[in-house]
Image (cartoon, helix red, strand yellow):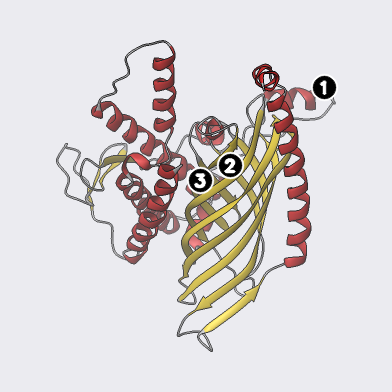
Amino acid sequence: MKSVIVGAVTFFVLFVFSLDKAWSIEKQPLSVDFEFEEKTLEPDQVVKTEWFYEVNVGKKGLYRIEHTVPDVDVMRAALGLEIPEDTKEEIRKAGGIVPNPVDPLEAYNELNTQEKLEFEHTRLMISRSVARALHHSQGLIFTGSLISNSLSYAKAKLFGKEWNPTKEAWAQKKQRVIEGIIRSLNYTLFYQAPLVLKRNEFGVVGSIGGIGLAGSFHHGRGGLAELGFSLGYNSKTRALVFQVLINPEKFKNTIMPVVSVAGINFKAGGFISYIPEGRETMNIRGQSFYPPAAPGFKSTSPYHFAFGFSSGLGLPPPPIADGMTFTNSMNTTRVLRVSISPFIKGFVNIGVGEVGQLISATMVTIKEAVATFKLRLQEYRHRPGAQTCEQMF
């Protein structure tokens, strides 16, 4: 648990500093070497090859970022926009018409040439920042490699085999996982290209809350209720912004036959937002995706995008729970928003969000989460091993 907390804090701090650097050079021209030959890169140097940007973010930190437009089918599957086959079959049996697949590149394709150039610039800056933060967090980063090595270790001990992974093997896995995280991030950036261009606020966010959900494919109950805090910078008002957030989430779907999680959850990551004038305290309505085999999260809405570390303690314990994947609908309320800037009248501006709707939604989520947790606890107590232990005592 200690390493998880340290890893979250490390990512949190590194991300905010690297993002600050990324946006500070946003208006400067890209320093990209277009030679196609292999070379040793200096720190923060970028080389554009035929298919990738090769980015050096530090010692032994060479990563590849695709500069081509993603494949639509691959991108759709990665974003969870595909309609499951069982759902299609149910629609056909009911006499309905299966809707056409969503085009995740529709918004990007509507951009003009200049907007696409600006988007590409911003996408590279964000990707470099994330790569730098993940790389310097070393072995504490939230990756599937940690889970994979843990399971390999347990398997080796169970069957009495030797387990001695090399540093090179870990480094290779680390690079592959970080590049996978960046690739997933880029899919979302392409999907939300207008938000990336219009963004006027960015920063870091962290939260703690209770989770209790269970489901199968598109059927389930429960969710998550958490208290969060964010610290960001609004480029339009040139203000430092602190927010208190309450985020109730409800189970929406999963690609797994069965998913069940109950306990305490922690999050830490970064965000970008577009805050329309006069709507600074509007709710954030969208969905949160928890990917498989890696303790992370990705929250999206028309005006907001956040991603980062997500893990916790409960039933089942990590890393098993971290390997589960599901999607929740979310309705985040900005309970309190404090903006501080010499350009604001009075230097400080305080806003309060939609508290009434927040209380109602949170109570419903907590009630369902508690019911799910009790059900999960009963199942745990009635498993064969637990009954044997109870009889012994």
Residue 289's disc is 2
Q: Is residue 123 visible?
A: no
**43 and 350: which one is in front?**
350
Q: Position of residue 123 (x, y in %)?
A: 40, 52
Determine the CA span between mark 3 and mark 2.
11 Å
Residue 93's disc is 1
Q: Position of residue 354 (x, y in %)?
A: 72, 67
- The three-letter code of the residue at mark 2 reads Phe
- Asked if residue 98 is positioned above or below residue 341 in the image, the reply reads above
Secondary structure at badge 3 equals: helix
The residue lying at 37 percent from left, 42 percent from top is 140
The residue lying at 39 percent from left, 15 percent from top is 156
- The three-letter code of the residue at mark 1 reads Lys
Q: Is residue 97 visible?
A: yes
Camera-side mark, 2 or 1: 2
Check the picture and name the quadrant holding the C terminus. top right
- Asked if residue 243 is positioned above or below residue 103 in the image, the reply reads below
Task: Determine crowd level at label 3: few under 14, some 14-19, many 20+ residues with C-alpha closer than 10 A.
Answer: many
Q: Disc 2 or 1, which lies upstream in sequence? A: 1
Camera-side mark, 1 or 3: 3
Secondary structure at badge 1 equals: helix
Q: Position of residue 299 (x, y in %)?
A: 57, 49
Residue 188's disc is 3
The residue lying at 26 percent from left, 48 percent from top is 57
- The three-letter code of the residue at mark 3 reads Thr
Task: Determine crowd level at label 1: few under 14, some 14-19, many 20+ residues with C-alpha closer than 10 A.
Answer: few
**366 and 384: which one is in front?**
384
